[in-house]
Image (cartoon, helix red, strand yellow):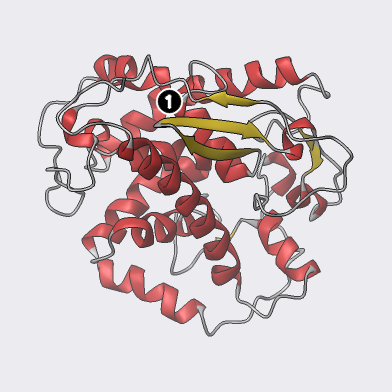
Amino acid sequence: MSNWVWLSRVTLLSFVGTGAFAVLLFSGRGFNQSASTPSDRIPSTTTSPGKIEAVDLSTFPLPTSMTGRDRSMKFAGDSKVPTRPFDLQQSLTSYSPLFAAPTSLGMVAIGVAEGNYRLLVKDSTLYVQQTPFYFGHTDPGNLSWGDVVSNYGPCSDQGRSKGDIALAERICLERALNGLPTQLFDLNAAGIDPNLDLEAVLNTADLYNQASPIHSRYFPKALAIARNGGLKGIEALAWARTASFYLNFNNEMDIEGGSNKATGLIGICARENRPTTEWQCVYDDQMRRVKAITNVLEKYRSLIPQGKTKPN
């Protein structure tokens, strides 16, 4: 199937009804799919926002080509093979510091996308503040399956910490680091050099945080299809994240014949009576998360002097 046929699925889906939201074509409860919560929504809690802390950038030296907006890099679609040999261990050495602490750049990006962090810039320093969501909120995605689950900490911990914030932070970091080798490998296999595509790395990590691992496994392939089809920037990232939720009965990514497995998000749209298709419901959420991550990186890059490989 050509890339244009895959991309045309977006147009087709914009005219297709949402269908029966509650039907799960395979075990949805096995997913840790978390619905995202925009940071401008205030939860019904008396907990005050947390302390303001500087983002820990000291352990994450970016290559020069990744520090500016006009990076000299080949995107998937320019070439089917990364422009230089891929060394997984080297990539892990570069990217593991993203998730070294709750205030490391990668975890901050996920936390902002979740609505658990607010990002601030003052006196040429990047800060984060824990929002009330950080201290516990009911995941609206799980409510779509009739489950009441509370998230704590910077990521979607799905209640594993039972309200212990320090434990939630450790769980978030450990899970992000455990998923990183596979994510870097998958990006490279799809023709995307992870060493030169920080946005792709962070969006893969965030999708792994938000949903079942199967979707972050398909995201690199979908991103390559999107870019080969002419989509760029945040549009390609949001399209690919959405496309990764379309699976067939064999759990293969299938935008043409598969069904949308983002049942938590679709359930939210149904409960809120949004006049939208399944595709648009999920796409809107994925675009919001992509923009949140991009905003974090734009603020980060704005603080790095051009030509330097390590932030001050």
Quadrant occupied by the N terminus: bottom left
Judge left or right: residue 68 versus residue 162. left
Note whether residue 213 is visible: no
Q: Position of residue 288 (x, y in %)?
A: 53, 57
Quadrant occupied by the C terminus: top left
Residue holding disc 1: 180
Q: Is residue 76 above or below residue 49?
A: below
Q: Position of residue 277 (x, y in %)?
A: 60, 76
Location of residue 113 (image quadrant): top right
Check disc 1 and report its element: helix, strand or loop: helix
Judge left or right: residue 241 versus residue 79. right
Q: How many marks?
A: 1
Note whether residue 223 is visible: yes
Please, which residue is most extreme toward the bottom here? Answer: 15
At a point 73% along the width and 67% down the height, the residue shown is: 21
At a point 86% along the width and 51% down the height, the residue shown is: 146
Judge left or right: residue 80 versus residue 147. left
Q: Is residue 287 above or below residue 74?
A: below
The residue closer to the viewer here, 259 or 36, is 36
At a point 55% along the width and 64% down the height, the residue shown is: 284
The residue closer to the viewer here, 28 or 118, is 118
At a point 28% along the width and 52% down the height, the residue shown is: 224
- For badge 1, the amino acid type reads Leu
The residue closer to the viewer here, 300 or 227, is 300
